[in-house]
């Protein structure tokens, strides 16, 4: 039967066979999947693995630097590339969710390609694709209509001409986490909630500005830290905040305010294909709402999303 230990042993053997003395490039996202893929490859081929971590300007607060430091501490050969301006400039004025995804996907490929070609003689591209990614993307061209295009699958331009290695392709998320533990990856990395490739772009409804990104980062930070403090983070499969394109009237002291509304979303799931909203304690929601409204300028109302998937999706876009 399947165990993480035998999976690791067999994969390392197989990766050594397939890759030989060639070089491999891998895009790290800060998420569980790409991290586990990187560490597995690192154990198989060591310094032949070159990792690239791109800041698209749409990550969580302080995430780029803290995760980059953590990767370096793990001995991975990783280059951090801050391309925030390139992404945010290109997204200015765009509101359509699928257009956002496509822009982000295309810029990511450009940035990644520039970096990959600056490493000489790379033969393989490694990806942290897992089984549910494969399934959800099949529907993009299959009989059912496009739901959402996940840009991290099949996004390789022909001109890169790299061979693909996807060591986690047959695994579900919980199995990836078990493999990560087997590989000795720190708990805080393995236990991270899933986070979409397009990042906060698909949690800012309507057009994206730097100011909106900053507001949402602050809100998200308060929410996620609160979940940790209350011991709820590990009970939730995924959580985040959504900035709505709506202003509502409020009152602060003697002043009338007319500011943004944010929604909080927390779901339970095993693979993201279906999900239920989480029954978070009212006291927690109360404390979180107060903190957000008191500490984040520009927000005067917080709502909690009580929709399950289906028919709602996890992300709002
Ligand atoms: P939905 O919103 O489709 O999300 O219920 C299911 C899971 O997929 C993530 N998600 C994405 N991940 N690129 C990604 O890499 C995307 O464009 C994308 N859209 C959604 C979402 O965060 C959830 O975990």
Image: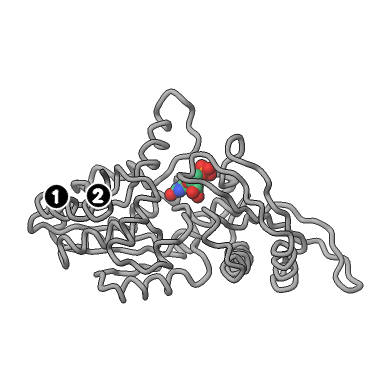
In the figure, is residue 161 to the left or right of 86?
Answer: left
Image coords of residue 27 (percent x, y): 31, 58
> In the image shown, does 3 or 8 lie closer to the viewer?
3
Q: Is mark 2 within 8 Å of ligand 1?
A: no
Q: Quadrant of the N terminus?
A: top left
In the figure, is residue 296 to the left or right of 41?
Answer: right
Question: Element type at marker 1?
Answer: helix
Image coords of residue 140 (percent x, y): 42, 32
Q: Which label number is shown at residue 55?
A: none
Q: Check disc 1: other Cα within 10 Å, few if <14, some if 14-19, many if 20+.
A: some
- The quarter of the picture where residue 295 lies is bottom right
Q: Are marks 2 and 1 in contact (CB under 8 Å)?
A: yes
How many numbered discs, if any?
2
Q: Quadrant of the C terminus?
A: top right
Q: Is residue 96 visible?
A: no
Where does label 2 land, which residue? 167
């Amino acid at each position: 039967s399947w165990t993480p230990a035998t999976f690791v042993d067999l994969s390392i053997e197989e990766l050594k066979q397939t890759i030989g003395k060639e070089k491999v490039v891998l895009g790290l996202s800060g998420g569980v999947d790409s991290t586990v893929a990187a560490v597995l490859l690192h154990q198989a081929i060591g310094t032949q693995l070159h990792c690239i971590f791109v800041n698209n300007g749409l990550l969580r607060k302080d995430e780029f630097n803290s995760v980059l430091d953590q990767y370096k501490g793990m001995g991975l050969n990783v280059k951090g590339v801050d391309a925030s301006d390139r992404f945010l400039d290109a997204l200015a004025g765009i509101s359509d969710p699928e257009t956002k995804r496509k822009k982000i996907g295309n810029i990511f490929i450009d940035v990644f390609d520039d970096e990959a070609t600056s490493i000489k003689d790379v033969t393989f591209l490694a990806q942290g694709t897992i089984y549910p990614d494969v399934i959800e993307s099949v529907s993009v061209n299959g009989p059912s209509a496009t739901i959402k295009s996940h840009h991290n699958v099949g996004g390789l331009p022909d001109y890169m001409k790299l061979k693909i290695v996807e060591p986690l392709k047959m695994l579900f998320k919980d199995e990836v986490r078990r493999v990560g533990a087997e590989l000795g990856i720190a708990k805080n990395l393995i236990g991270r909630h899933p986070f979409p490739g397009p990042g906060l772009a698909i949690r800012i409804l309507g057009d994206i500005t730097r100011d909106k990104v900053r507001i949402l980062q602050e809100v998200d930070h308060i929410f996620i830290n609160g979940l940790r403090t209350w011991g709820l983070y590990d009970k939730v499969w995924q959580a985040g905040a959504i900035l709505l394109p709506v202003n509502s009237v409020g009152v602060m002291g003697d002043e009338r305010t007319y500011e943004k509304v944010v929604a909080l979303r927390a779901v339970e799931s095993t693979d993201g294909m279906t999900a239920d909203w989480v029954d978070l304690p009212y006291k927690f929601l109360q404390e979180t709402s107060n903190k957000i409204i008191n500490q984040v300028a520009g927000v005067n109302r917080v709502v909690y999303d009580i929709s399950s998937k289906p028919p709602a999706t996890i992300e709002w876009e």
